[in-house]
Structures are given as C-alpha cells and as structure tokens.
Amino acid sequence: MTGDQGRRRDAIDRILDEWAHERPDLDVSALAVIGRLSRYAALVQARLDAVFAEHGLQSWEFDVLSALRRSGSPYELTPGELDRALLITSGTTTHRVQRLEARGFVTRRRDDEDRRIVRVRLTGTGLAAHEATHDAHAANETRILAGLDPGERDALLGGLQALGRVLGDATDEATALGGDAR
Amino acid sequence: MTGDQGRRRDAIDRILDEWAHERPDLDVSALAVIGRLSRYAALVQARLDAVFAEHGLQSWEFDVLSALRRSGSPYELTPGELDRALLITSGTTTHRVQRLEARGFVTRRRDDEDRRIVRVRLTGTGLAAHEATHDAHAANETRILAGLDPGERDALLGGLQALGRVLGDATDEATALGGDAR
DNA sequence: CAGACATATCTCGACGTCAAGATATTCCGC
DNA sequence: GCGGAATATCTTGACGTCGAGATATGTCTG
C-alpha cells in the first residue's frame, strides 16, 4: 500500500526483511515509520553537528544561543524557560549555562523583583557567535532537503505535522526529554 | 504551500513565529521540517522508553536483544555487526555487551577459526526477555501511529523514505552516529 | 503573620556514549 | 615465511545528560 516500487533499499528495509524472515506473522508497518524517524533524525543530526563543529560550536551550545536569539531583544531567558524550550532538565540547563558563561557567550544575574529567578542573557560575543554560525546552519538544513522534490517535501512536512498532532506536541504539554529545534 | 489551515499550533510553530518576528527575512521552511523531525523523534523515543521500562529494560538493551533476535537462529552476531546494526561505536558495543552478559542475556566467546572475532549470542533468558517485551513494544508503536489517518501515514512514510534516499542511507554507507531501529 | 505549599534553580552521583588509541590476530605480497 | 597492512575488539578518559533531592525565595490561607 505504500508504493516503494523501484525505491533503493535502505537500512530499515533490511531490518524489515529480517523480521519478515524470522517472524512473518508480525506487522512491521509501524516499525517502518518509527524506525526511519529515529534513524533519520540521528543521521540529520550528525550532518548538523558537522557544520556547528566548523564554527567551533557544539549542538547544545548553538541550541541555547538560538533560543536566546529568537526570543528577541534583550535576548534574555530564565533557566526554566530554557528547560522548556530545549526539552532538557534543569540540571542540564545549569550545566550548559555555566559553560556558556565561561566562554563569555552569556551572563547570569539574579532578578531583583523575584530572587528565585535568574536571567540568562546573550552577550555581544554570544550574539556574534550565533550570527556567524546561523547562516551556514540554515544553508545546511536547506541543502539536506534540497534532494527532495516539492511533493516529497510536502508529504514529509504534512506527515510530520500530523505526527505532532498525535504526539500532543501543542503548547507546553511538555511531556518528555531530548530533541529540539534550532 | 503546505496548507496548515486549521491545524493546531505546536511547539515548532511557535519557534517559527519567533523567527518571523525577529528575522522576517529568513527562510525557515527547512527548519519547519528538520525541527519537527528532531523533536518528534525525541518525543516518540520517550514513549518507547516508557514501555521498555515497564518490562525492566533500557532502550539500548532492547536494541541489542532485538538485533540478535532478528538475525535468526542461533541469534548470534559479532560486536562489529552490532556496531553497524545499531549505529554505535565499538567502545559502546563492548560496554553494552558486558552489561548484558552480566544480566545473563547474552554470552560472549572467541571464534576458533579467527581469534580476532567474538561471538555474542542471545541466551534463553535474553530471548525470553525480548519476547516478553516485544509485543508490548510493537503495540506501542502501532498505538502511537493509530491517530494518523491512512493518507497522513502514507505521506509520512513516503516522505521519510525520500529523506532516507537523500541522506544516502543505503546499505552500509555507515556515515554517522546515534539512532537505530527496533 | 505563621506555617504550609509552590516555584525556581542548583547540586550530586550515576550512566551511556564517544573518540582515540592500544592490543591481538589474520592476510597478503614478495 | 616475514614484515607490514588490515581487521576486530577492547581500554581509557572526557563529556553531556538525567533523576532525585537540596536550597532559597515567594505566595496563600486561616
């Protein structure tokens, strides 16, 4: 039902073949989707990492800088906001911010109104590091998808949007860990 | 061009909105795809992890057991084959196999013909652990996708297959790290 | 206004992974 | 059959993340 006539066989096809041989009774159609989602996300991430590395950044560094940048002037968020934006735990945020502070990319200061709150703010250096990397990163993302024809690309986007709906990824249901967008 | 009329807005839409406000000149259409790919892969993984945890397994444990199981009787692979099947480094494989051996799920032995090679074999206990978890896992994957209508699901699968082609994920080009399929 | 609860951040220890290189074994060309 | 290259696995140290809980501050209720 999914017309893979003539398509080049990939690593997931081989896994499906193995299951078909070992357990022909199984329905592997969900695996065909979820296996690819997982695998291709990892392959794409590796390609993104390569460009970040060329600019002397780790993915996690770019993620934080990007979250601050897109929040708009004065490029400032609290650790809690970073937790939620990046789907990471608070301990991870503390650690990330410490290292970005050490590189001079952000500053930290207590809020005076509510002294529980910390304000993490992009420095000029941090903004410059983001700017210097962002164009190459965006071009990289565009290049990765350039091999898709418009129909395929729309299908992928539409399918992912539907998946997002199913996963309940709407404003702040904030269930889980890992992953992010830059 | 991608008709998101009436679609519920998700976390990626909010990120795109922020960029549209901060840098209206940017083309964020690739981010709309790749951001979702990354985020949803992580959200799906969290759901899979939950079922593995109910069965006393970590994802990485199930991954290894599954690779051995689907390889067919005698359920035996070398560490190198596991590296390639699971997209992990050899050091990680050594570590994983040691811990699975400690749990009694696999055995390790040197090959007699070629003493560089190790044979990692599923034990009865390991096979049982896989069997006990596999059905729930498969049902979980099916359930995650159950909210998609057939057209959406085909679009997602087709889009991912096209992406796989673009990423060059064909037999053993083995570029990168992370991710896997179960 | 005291006490209980809520919120925000940080600390600590454990874990899984990677990258680079060490070791052991086999293959190959001469 | 010897020496160097190739292959397979393991070792080591560093790193990023998590989960649970500690600390500090703020809010609300009676």
Image (cartoon, coloured by chain):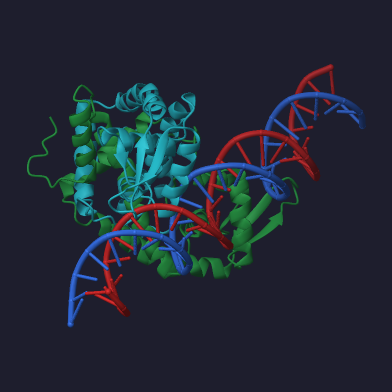
Chain colours: A cyan, B green, C red, D blue
Left or right of residue B50, residue A57 in this image: right
Can see residue A182? no
Find residue A9 and report its image quarter.
Answer: top left
In the image, A161 versus A133, the foreground residue is A133
Left or right of residue B62, residue D25 in this image: left
How many numbered discs, if any?
0
Name the residue at 43% across, 66% down: B53
Residue A37 screen position, x and y as percent: 34, 44
Left or right of residue A9, residue B149 in this image: left
Residue B133 screen position, x and y as percent: 42, 67
Compared with A164, B104 (above or below) is below
Residue B59 screen position, x and y as percent: 46, 58
Left or right of residue A132, residue B109 in this image: right
Find residue B114 and report its image quarter.
Answer: top right
In the image, B65 versus A174, the foreground residue is A174
Can see residue A74? yes
Residue B21 screen position, x and y as percent: 18, 31
Q: Where does the N terminus of chain B fall, quadrant-wise?
A: top left
Find residue A26 and report its image quarter.
Answer: bottom left
In the image, B124 versus A67, the foreground residue is A67
Name the residue at 26% across, 37% down: A71
